[in-house]
Image: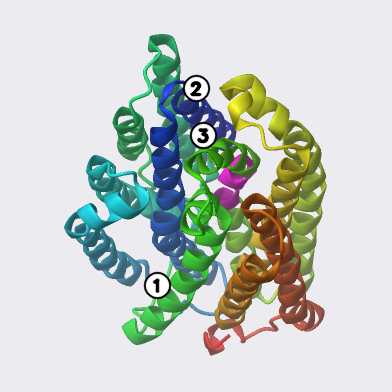
Amino acid sequence: MGVSLLGLGSYVLLLAVFRHAPTSDVAAFGSFWALSFGLVGGVMLPFEQLMVRATAEGVSESSGGESSTIAPSNVLRLYLVVSVALSLGLVLGSSTLANRLLGGEQGLAYILAGYVLVSAGQSWQRGRAAGGGRLDIYGRQLGIDGGVRLAVGAAFLLSDSGDVHLAALGLLVAGLVSLPFSQPPQFSAKYKTGRMRTLAREAMLLSSASTISLWLLNAGPVVVVVIGAPPMVAASFAPLFVITRVPLLFQASLQSVVLARVVTHRELGDTAGLRRSVVTALSSVAIAGVGVIIGFGVMADAWAGLLYGPRFQLGILAGSGLALSTALFLIAAVGHVALVGLNATSRAAAAWMATAIAFVMVLLWVPGDVIERVVAAYVFAGVMLLVLQAVSLAPKMRHGPGPGQPGAGMNG
């Protein structure tokens, strides 16, 4: 329910901006949205995953599991430093960022800097809640965040406002409001202090993979600007891209739930339970992916024309290709956290790095106009990523982690 409300609230807020903002502001807000998911998510999602892992390991150990390799307190200290540094960097580089990607709107860069800090707090809460099995708290935070976004978007629609600064502030306020109501409880767990060097290495690998993945998944509007699309084409692409990427709002919560289960099965040496959890998650997401292709692919272009006007229609092939890539990346989200939960973070990161290189190569070498090249690159990247993950995951799923392996190391 919480994830659904977050998706609806995000969509209504985007709808308000795309309907009422000038064309130049639509492109700027599309880049802001991509940055909020790509840059911020690239840092905060690994924070959440590390917190899920640390909490789940500690809770499992208190229930007879093997070992706790990282401590939540160390995760918190590390990412406080990282989030403050990132926020400060955005403030100091706000002028350059605004001129290059945000249509000269420096205020959007300042709002993004604040959003980094809010996202850090949200990630800590979600990681603790998911790792301790308190999905009610996890869903509550997403629901409150989504509810505020929905209210802000509805207010914009009713007032015919297209101010992108107010819309960005709405995103920031939604996160702030959710924090006081989403505090996770203290769990009965056994934590070891762990080595900060080991944690830093794991954080670096996860941050690299997440930054690449979230940029790849959400940076479409930025990519078309960078490779020289005319302003009207860039503005038309942003709404279609965002519509087809709406299902990815489910990705973070999906990954946290699957990761907590994989870590728990690994800690307890439950190979059958591990296989069952991963296969069930992959099957469920694959089935949902068919719905994504039909609902968001076939209809995305029509929705863009109906909701935002004919100027935003690019054709059914563009919408279908983007929706297909969304479905592929949703399946890959499960494969990624399965590898992370099985101490194969380096392999998960390597798969994303290779995929990003392939994306750029297709973008540069495939003939066609800007939109055709971007869509082809996304579809190829999704297929390649699944193949690379399958190669790494298959032997681990066949043989299982085995008792005593969980604490053996984090070398991937």
Residue type indicated by callout 3: Leu
- Helix, strand or loop at mark 3: helix
User: In this view of the protein, which residue sits in the foreground, 242 or 129?
Assistant: 242
Give whichever of discs 1 and 2 has the lower sequence position.
Answer: 2
- Helix, strand or loop at mark 2: helix
Residue 191 is marked as 1
Magenta region: 246-253
Give whichever of discs 1 and 3 has the lower sequence position.
Answer: 3
- Helix, strand or loop at mark 1: loop
Residue at 28% over, 67% down: 82
Quick check: 261 left or right of 198? right
Q: Which image quarter is the N terminus in?
A: top right
Residue at 59% over, 33% down: 4
- In the rendered structure, are the residues bearing label 1 and label 3 in contact, judged by CB atoms less than 8 Å apart? no
What residue does disc 3 label?
6
Of discs 2 and 3, which sits in the foreground? Answer: 2
What residue does disc 2 label?
19
